[in-house]
Image: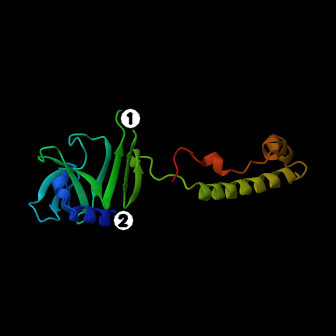
Amino acid sequence: MNIATMIKQIASQGGSGMGFAVGTVTAVDKAARTVDVQPLTEDAPLLGVNLQANQESTVGVVQIPREGSFVMVGFVQDGAAGMVLLCDDIEEAQVVIKDVKTASMVVNEDGIVMNGGELHGLVKVEAMTKRLNLIEDDINKLKQAITSWTPVPQDGGAALKSGVASWAGSQLVKTKVKDTENERVKQ
């Protein structure tokens, strides 16, 4: 059973009298972290419903419901204030950890942005490894050519060969996935 079906089932059982209401999102205000909801019971619209317990907060986990989606709104004891409890479809999810300067994540249709996205996309480890191996193979071929080169007498090549022999004699080690993968951050 999906969330939309569960929400409709709860609403049909008289959920609004139990401290919550089920309805459709009619407007979203990301900046204020609120939504407007039209209850399925056709009661008056619920305006400015909080998306988190503390509307003034900029930290925590916040689900931004998509306009037209179903939500369940829970009410404070007197029914004066409400907060979205469940969403059947979200446009975006935001996670911000308090007192940690760069611990945030936004997930939406465009993808995942962690810590503001200032470092751009994560490395694709497999593709990077293949590319590095191609470069390493090319350098190794060049090194092999230099070490197998025989200088012609009187051309100064002997000095070149002795100068690069130790560098050219050691083959590069191919890059492994574990060499370029940050195991704490998975793409």
Q: Amino acid at mark 1?
A: Val
**Residue at the extreme left of the image, as rendered:** 44
Do the numbered discs 1 and 2 sit on residues whose CB atoms are within 8 Å?
no
Give percent across and percent down for residue 166. Answer: 82, 41
**Residue 55 occupies which quadrant of the picture?**
top left
Say which element carries label 2.
loop
User: Where the N terminus falls, by quadrant?
Assistant: bottom left
Residue lying at 15% horizontally and 43% vertically, measured from the top left: 77
Mark linked to residue 63? none
Question: Looking at this view, is 120 or 14 the one in front?
Answer: 14
Give percent across and percent down for residue 38. Answer: 15, 62
Report crowding for label 1: few under 14, some 14 to 19, many 20 or more residues within 10 A (C-alpha).
Answer: few
Q: Is residue 141 left or right of residue 18?
A: right
Q: Which residue is mark 1?
A: 100
Give percent across and percent down for residue 144. Answer: 82, 53
Vertical arrangement, residue 150 with respect to residue 24, above or below:
above
Say which element carries label 1.
loop
Q: Is residue 176 left or right of residue 111?
A: right
Q: Amino acid at mark 2?
A: Asn
Residue lying at 81% horizontally and 55% vertically, measured from the top left: 145
Q: How is the image coloured?
A: rainbow
In whole angstroms, how far apart are the C-alphas of marks 1 and 2?
A: 35 Å
Report crowding for label 2: few under 14, some 14 to 19, many 20 or more residues within 10 A (C-alpha).
Answer: few
Q: Which residue is mark 2?
A: 2
